[in-house]
Image (cartoon, helix red, strand yellow):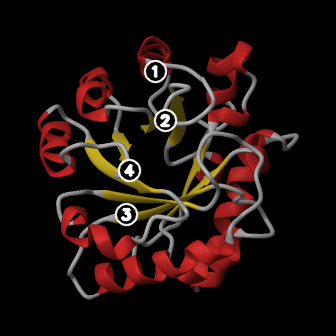
Amino acid sequence: MAHRPLIAPSILSADFARLGDEIRAVAGEGDTRADWVHVDVMDAHFVPNLTLGLPVVQSLIKATDVPIDCHLMIENPDKWAIGYAEAGAYNVTVHVEAAHDPVALAKNLRAAGAKAGLSIKPNTPIEDHLDTLKHYDTLLVMSVEPGFGGQSFIEGVLDKVRTARRLVDTGHLKLVVEIDGGINADTIEQAAEAGVDCFVAGSAVYGAEDPGKAVAALREQAARVRG
């Protein structure tokens, strides 16, 4: 398990008119610094919402040295995902439900310089994709239905986290276990206990008066559980 819990604030909950400032608010020193900045790319096809795309991500990568974690909730990621890796995203995550050839896609993402992430929706069983996950660096377990911010945490997905954690701890998989959806002070401890390495938090960070302090507080909560 990663030694220190990773916190990835989601700019889906930030002020889109001030994205540069919002990222700077979590790019400070020490514990107040985010490990990754999570960027949700939605195309209004794979999910019913539309957010931002490659040009905005390219600008964000230029504006910060915090690693950018791109979560592509899009159709045909086999075609579009590589552009985000080439732009300099640290981690590019695609949905297993949307990728046509996820193994080839993982290789192409890595070749383009990014870590390869695979995301699974709340109702997608992890067992069907264990062989595919051997080719990936990150597993993103969705703890809400993808497409909208501010939803409630689905506790049932933690079984998938436990399965992944067990396989990582026994050496069958080598990846970071990430969770996204409804993560806040009330839910982060359950997620940490199940074995999550990286916690995506939206309104819990950007709804706080001081986003950097919120990052530090969430990390401390998760670290306490993991002892």
Q: Residues within 10 Å of mark 3 (few under 14, many from 20)?
A: many
Instruction: Look at 40% across and 82% down and name the residue there.
Output: 163
Question: Of discs 4 and 3, which sits in the foreground?
Answer: 4
**Relative vertical location of residue 50 with respect to residue 5 in this rendering, above or below:** above
Please state if 67 lies on the left or on the right of 19 as rendered: left
Of labels 1 and 4, earlier in sequence is: 1
**In front here: 147 or 214?**
147
According to the picture, the residue beneath numbered tag 3 turns out to be: 176
**In front here: 134 or 148?**
148
Between the residue at mark 1 and the residue at mark 4, the CA separation in whole angstroms equals 23 Å
Q: Cβ–Cβ below 8 Å for labels 1 and 4? A: no
Between the residue at mark 4 and the residue at mark 2, the CA separation in whole angstroms equals 9 Å
Q: Secondary structure at mark 2?
A: loop
Between the residue at mark 2 and the residue at mark 3, the CA separation in whole angstroms equals 24 Å
Looking at the picture, how far across and down is residue 184, in whole percent? Answer: 75, 60
Of labels 2 and 1, earlier in sequence is: 2
Q: Residues within 10 Å of mark 4 (few under 14, many from 20)?
A: some
Farthest residue toward the right?
A: 209
Q: Which mark is residue 97?
A: 4
| Residue type indicated by callout 2 | Phe
Between the residue at mark 1 and the residue at mark 3, the CA separation in whole angstroms equals 22 Å
**In front here: 59 or 70?**
70
According to the picture, the residue beneath numbered tag 2 turns out to be: 46
According to the picture, the residue beneath numbered tag 1 turns out to be: 57
Of labels 4 and 3, earlier in sequence is: 4
Q: Cβ–Cβ below 8 Å for labels 4 and 2? A: yes
Q: Which mark is residue 66?
A: none
| Residue type indicated by callout 4 | Glu
